[in-house]
Amino acid sequence: MGWFSDVGSGAKRDRGALGVLMEEVREGTVDILLTWKIDRLARSLNHLAQIIAELQTHKVALVCPSQGIDTTDGNPCAQFQLNILAAVAQFERELITERVNAGLAAARQRGTRLGRPATPGAMRVRAMELRSAGRSASEISEILKLPYSTVTELFRQNSNVQTNLT
């Protein structure tokens, strides 16, 4: 039996004692996690859902006496309680997705350009010149201070243009 106590904000996901506790859960040395109130364990539904999923994976019961939560095998309501908690967490994830998509739609409607910024034409020309001079994609990436993936995409686009012209 061990006690884990954090000092500081419970709103943080990376709390020292919680991290140690979850490591012990993963190692299989914890059978029951007892917490006075569920908000002492996690401060968001998303974080709680992650913790509960990990507890279920490692067959660790969650007991919260002040709120009547007991997921031990001896409790006939245990699976029901876990299903309710999981449903609430899924609902929260769906709300977050809906809010993000609504925000993206609103940004598009305002004319905000989303995604990676376009590579300026001068960079394209310079990249092709360097390629013609025998430089590799990684060298060109370093010289032009562009991501390697951008340089290789420029090469692909250029080869598609040349193929379509012939």
Image (cartoon, rainbow, N blue to C red):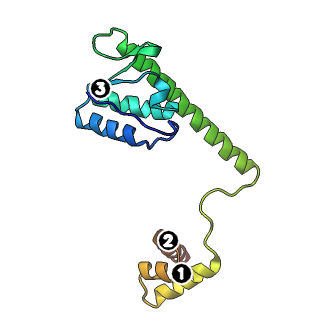
Q: In the rendered image of this protein, does residue 28 appear above or below residue 127?
A: above
Residue 18 percent coordinates (x, y): 39, 37
| Distance between mark 2 and mark 1 Cα atoms | 9 Å
Comparing marks 3 and 1, which lies closer to the viewer? 3
Residue 147, numbered circle: 2
Mark 2 neighbour class, 10 Å CA radius: few under 14, some 14 to 19, many 20 or more: few
Residue type pointed to by label 1: Leu
Number of marks in picture: 3
Residue 39 percent coordinates (x, y): 50, 27
- For mark 1, what is the residue? 144
Taking the spot 27% from the left edge, 36% from the top edge, the residue there is: 24
Q: Quadrant of the N terminus?
A: top left
Q: Are marks 2 and 1 in contact (CB under 8 Å)?
A: no
In front: 31, or 54? 31
Q: Secondary structure at mark 3?
A: loop
Residue type pointed to by label 2: Pro
Q: In the rendered image of this protein, does residue 88 appear above or below residue 69?
A: below
Mark 3 neighbour class, 10 Å CA radius: few under 14, some 14 to 19, many 20 or more: many
Q: Residue furthest top?
A: 76
Residue 60, numbered circle: 3
